[in-house]
Amino acid sequence: MAAKVPALVVKSAVREVVGGKMRISDSFFEALNKKVEALIKEAMKRAKENGRSTLRGYDV
């Protein structure tokens, strides 16, 4: 069984961006969290391939 990923997305911040214009389901937050995790892993891969141990904006 894979380790559970900690919450990477702040729900209240997402709700603020949405601004009450739409409702947000729990499955949206789960999917968004997975996307953020994948984005971080891809940035880590890019930094490592470039010989760095620091993630930078352009790794995203």
Image: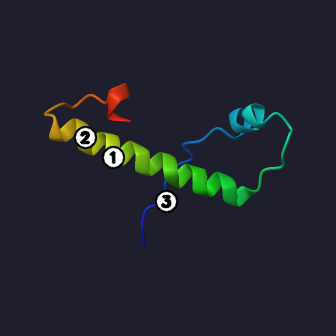
Tell me the tag on residue 46: 2
Q: Amino acid at mark 1?
A: Glu
Q: Amino acid at mark 3?
A: Lys
Say left or right for 48 vs 17. Answer: left
Local packing at callout 3 (Cα closer than 10 Å; few below 14, some 14-19, many 20+) is few
Give residue 17's position: percent from left, percent from top.
Answer: 73, 32
Report how far apart the C-alphas of labels 1 and 3 lie in the structure.
18 Å
- Whether residues under marks 1 and 2 lie with C-beta atoms below 8 angstroms apart, the answer is yes
Instruction: Please report whichever mark, 3 or 2, sits nearer to the chain's N-terminal start.
Output: 3
Image quadrant assignment for residue 39: top left
Which residue occupies 43% across, 62% down?
3
> Is the residue 18 above or below the residue 30 in the image?
above
The image quadrant where one finds the N terminus is bottom left
Tell me the tag on residue 42: 1
Of the residues tagged 3 and 2, which is closer to the observer?
2
Say left or right for 46 vs 3. Answer: left
Q: Amino acid at mark 2?
A: Arg
Image quadrant assignment for residue 49: top left
Which residue occupies 54% across, 43% down?
8
Q: Nearer the viewer, residue 20 or 10?
A: 20
Give residue 38's position: percent from left, percent from top.
Answer: 42, 51
Give residue 18's position: percent from left, percent from top.
Answer: 77, 37
The type of colouring in the image is: rainbow
Image quadrant assignment for residue 40: top left
Report how far apart the C-alphas of labels 1 and 2 lie in the structure.
6 Å
Instruction: Please report whichever mark, 1 or 3, sits nearer to the chain's N-terminal start.
Output: 3
Of the residues tagged 1 and 3, which is closer to the observer?
1
Q: Secondary structure at mark 3?
A: loop
Q: Nearer the viewer, residue 20 or 53?
A: 20
| Mark 3 lies on residue | 4
The image quadrant where one finds the C terminus is top left
